[in-house]
Image: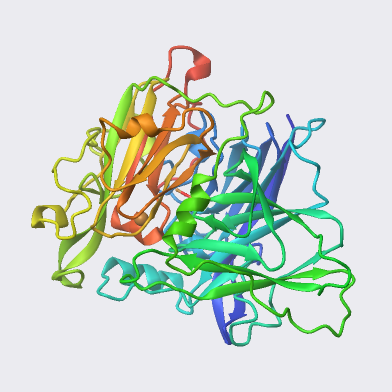
Amino acid sequence: RKANHYDFVITETNVTRLCQEKTILTVNGQFPGPTIHARQGDVVFVNVHNRGRKNITLHWHGVDQPRNPWFDGPEFITQCPIQPGANFTYRIVFSNEEGTLWWHAHSDFDRATVHGAIVVRPKLGSAYPYPEPHRDIPIILGEWWNVNVEHLLEETMRAGGDFNISDANTINGQPGDLFPCSRKGTFRVPVERGRTYMLRVINAGLTNDMFFAVAGHNLTVVGSDGHYLKPFTVGHIMIAAGQTMNVLLHADRAANASSRYYMAARTFATNMQIPVNNSTATAVLEYSDAPPSAGPPAALPDLPAVDDLAAATAYTARLRSLATDGHPVDVPTRVDERMLVTISVNALPCATCEGPINGTRFAASLNNVSFVAPAVDILDAYYSSVRGVYEPDFPDRPPLFYNFTAPDPADELLFTKRGTKVKVVEYGAVVEVVFQGTALGAEPHPMHLHGFAFYAVGRGFGNFDESKDPATYNLVDPPRQNTVSVPAGGWAAIRFRATNPGVWFMHCHFDRHTVWGMDTVFIVKNGKTPDTQMLPRPPTMPKC
Ligand code: C2O
Ligand code: CU
């Protein structure tokens, strides 16, 4: 095993976007932050020095961290935050992942600007399951707000009708040519004619799923969330918030064709009653033989419309695991625990708020429980048997029955209960979670699980029918992911083996839903042998 070390200094940095200068939180003054390079099986150390003015934590999104929840990162779930002036070294253990993952802050809304790519190559001496690309190009899709993110968080917690739509989508931190004062900064990708490039596309957006395409070029999708897929070629991809997609781009335009092409990212959102940022971020693909005098690219790529549900659904249906001898799948066929989890946006009483009903604020829930983060972390409380921090009775079924897709929910469904409820599972149990979207917040929800790459075995519209729908599951070659897009008014089913002991967060990757309570935690118990048990608590853990 090879150990690599990175120093990440959290600092406030001035940047100019959309004609305004603003102070943002960065790592090492870079936005997006530095790329972490690893090979499958590596251990990487990242020493985070907090030179900012607020508490922060970092998370390694999609890294399973076997037996190692101490360094997973979500604040008050697996650690207390790193305080200003302090530092903390994360130990990141790569096991099965190969492809693209990413890292981001996991405290408040800090990840809006504190994020970067993780590139995981095959072990030395092993090859990609496709011809080696000439170069890797991280493409981080994000969102930009003119207001600062502390303000955004504050608004979100007392939200009225104003959802604080982002002011621009971005590609590698830049809105691109279509925005004022943005042309100079537009991200450029130099390519040589005849070569193949690996675009490592990451959706780091806080509130948006996205479509992405490159004018004049098809994209061959070969991986997602750090696992290989059966290759397929498309004109555009859809990438839910939190996901990654590995796509090969062949720089194959004829020499007499034009030499500059737009790459573009546009929001995908189905419920247009919820205000969304429907802007298009651009970058430029530039052939090395482009004459310096050539102007900007002629046309945007063909992207589906913002609310093109059919395009998004058709894309997602094409994701299948590679499933070869070198990259086998191992889908559990027997289930120990099937959980039916409804996803809602709700209301909570708040005298001074102007939420969905006057005198309420927005909340969100899983099975009618709005998760409240405790004041000390759940992992520590579990490890040291401290009582009163969480309750181990997260409901496996929705406590109230209703037609999930009915437009007008009863009041008892609109109002939710607050609690810090977790689900405890035995080591090795096969868990199936069926996420059911409801009419309460009819948006797709990118549900993300820490600690595991699950199999996304099924997906459909309407109400999940336990007597029929499991028969439609793909148990042959379902994609292995850490974030599944649950369709608005529909459901998605995932399966995983609980062979990673520890404390693992599960939440919607839209940040306003996370802070509104669309979260829960899995506690996976230790197995019987030492190699099936959590590692001991490192002495360096930050204190609350
Ligand atoms: Cu990408 Cu809990 O996060
Ligand atoms: Cu959500």
**Quadrant position of residue 178:** bottom right
Left/right of residue 3 with respect to residue 381 in the rendered view: right
Q: Residue 446's spot in the image, x, y percent?
A: 42, 51
| Residue at 26% in and 37% down | 465
Q: Residue 233's spot in the image, x, y percent?
A: 66, 50
- If the image is split into quadrants, where does the N terminus sit? top right
Residue 115 sits above or below residue 431 on the image: below
Considering depth in this image, is 349 or 472 the residue closer to the camera?
Answer: 472
Left/right of residue 354 with respect to residue 445 in the rendered view: left
**Quadrant position of residue 425:** top left
User: Which residue is the extreme one toward the top?
Assistant: 529
How was this image coloured? rainbow
Q: Residue 442's spot in the image, x, y percent?
A: 29, 59
Q: Residue 226's spot in the image, x, y percent?
A: 61, 41
| Residue at 28% in and 40% down | 464
| Residue at 85% in and 55% down | 195
Considering depth in this image, is 187 or 335 the residue closer to the camera?
Answer: 335
Residue 246 sits above or below residue 274 on the image: above
Camera sees residue 540 = no
Residue 530 sits above or below residue 37 on the image: above
